[in-house]
Amino acid sequence: MEHENDVFLHQIDEKILCYHGPIIYEAKIIKAQYLKEKGPYYYVHYIGWKQTWDEWVPQCRVLKCNEENLKIQQQIMNSLEKKNKTVDKTAETAAAAAKKKASVLEKGKKRKREISVKKTDDIVKKSKIIIDLPDALRTFMIHDCNNIKSRMFVPLPRKPTVSDIISDYRVWRCEKLGNKDSCNAEEIIIGVHFYFNRCLGTRLLYQLERHQYKEMREKFKHLDNSQIYGAEHLLRLFGK
């Protein structure tokens, strides 16, 4: 333990950049601690956020606040904004096309409508990624569904959040597998994070949860869905 201080790359009270999910935020180091078999950890406060979001993070999530890393931060933001615009544009185009197609089908025969609907269903089914969930998780999802029907909603904001879970997975993967296929893995991690944020409100909620969702979006406008919701809703992404 005598060389612990040698492995800390950052200091207490230092202004840094820190990964929270796929995005880099400005933060300040409040405390530092060396965890056996895990290495240096920092307790950080995200600048402009409430203290309830302060958290311990591994050193691999912390960057020096310099010109080079600020450029990386901006590149990530630009990339996510570009993806958002692409998704929005695609959704608008698809909606317009669907509306036009529906109008045409209304003038046709019932058989033609049935064929069209069947083809659409086939396309949706083929595009789904099927993940074989363990029985324990399937049982958990059934209990989750029953709780919602009984109006026993998950308390929000959740801890750990989806962002926390994804960040912990990123750290675990880095420690266990090193740089093996790191580029492909990071793309998948960012993709899951992005897809959750975009699809929660439209695909992952039960009807009874929509009022709670509206309240959360109004109360936490500066946060992504992945910084509010937790494991229950992330599991629905893979199990629905």
Image (spheres, rainbow, N blue to C red):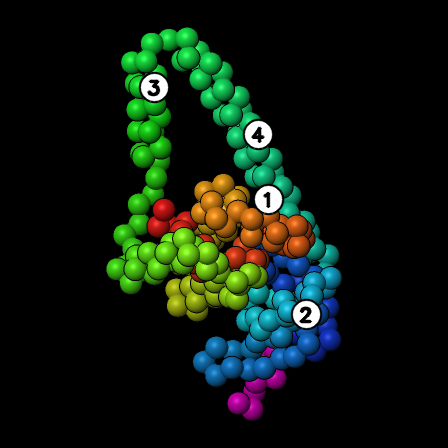
For the residues labelled 2 and 1, the Cα–Cα distance comes to: 26 Å
Mark closest to the chain's N terminus, 4 or 1: 1
Residue at 55% x, 61% y: name it.
Answer: 156
Helix, strand or loop for disc 1? helix
Residue assigned mark 4? 89
For the residues labelled 4 and 3, the Cα–Cα distance comes to: 24 Å
Mark closest to the chain's N terminus, 1 or 3: 1
Look at discs 2 and 1 and give the one toward the viewer. 2
For the residues labelled 1 and 3, the Cα–Cα distance comes to: 34 Å
- The quadrant in which residue 42 appears is bottom right
Say whether residue 66 is left or right of residue 91. Answer: right
Q: Local crowd at mark 1 within 10 Å, few (<14), some, or many (≥20)?
A: some
Look at discs 1 and 3 and give the one toward the viewer. 3
Q: Position of residue 9 (x, y in %)?
A: 63, 74
Residue assigned mark 3? 116
Q: Is residue 181 visible?
A: no
For the residues labelled 4 and 2, the Cα–Cα distance comes to: 36 Å
Q: Does the magenta portion include 231? A: no
For the residues labelled 4 and 1, the Cα–Cα distance comes to: 14 Å
Q: Which residues are magenta?
A: 1-8
Q: Position of residue 131 (x, y in %)?
A: 31, 50
Q: Nearer the viewer, residue 161 or 73?
A: 161
Residue assigned mark 2? 51
Q: Which mark is residue 80?
A: 1
Tell me the kind of residue under disc 2. Gln
Mark closest to the chain's N terminus, 2 or 1: 2
Q: Are marks 2 and 1 in contact (CB under 8 Å)?
A: no
Helix, strand or loop for disc 3? helix
Up/down of 209 relative to 45, above or below: above
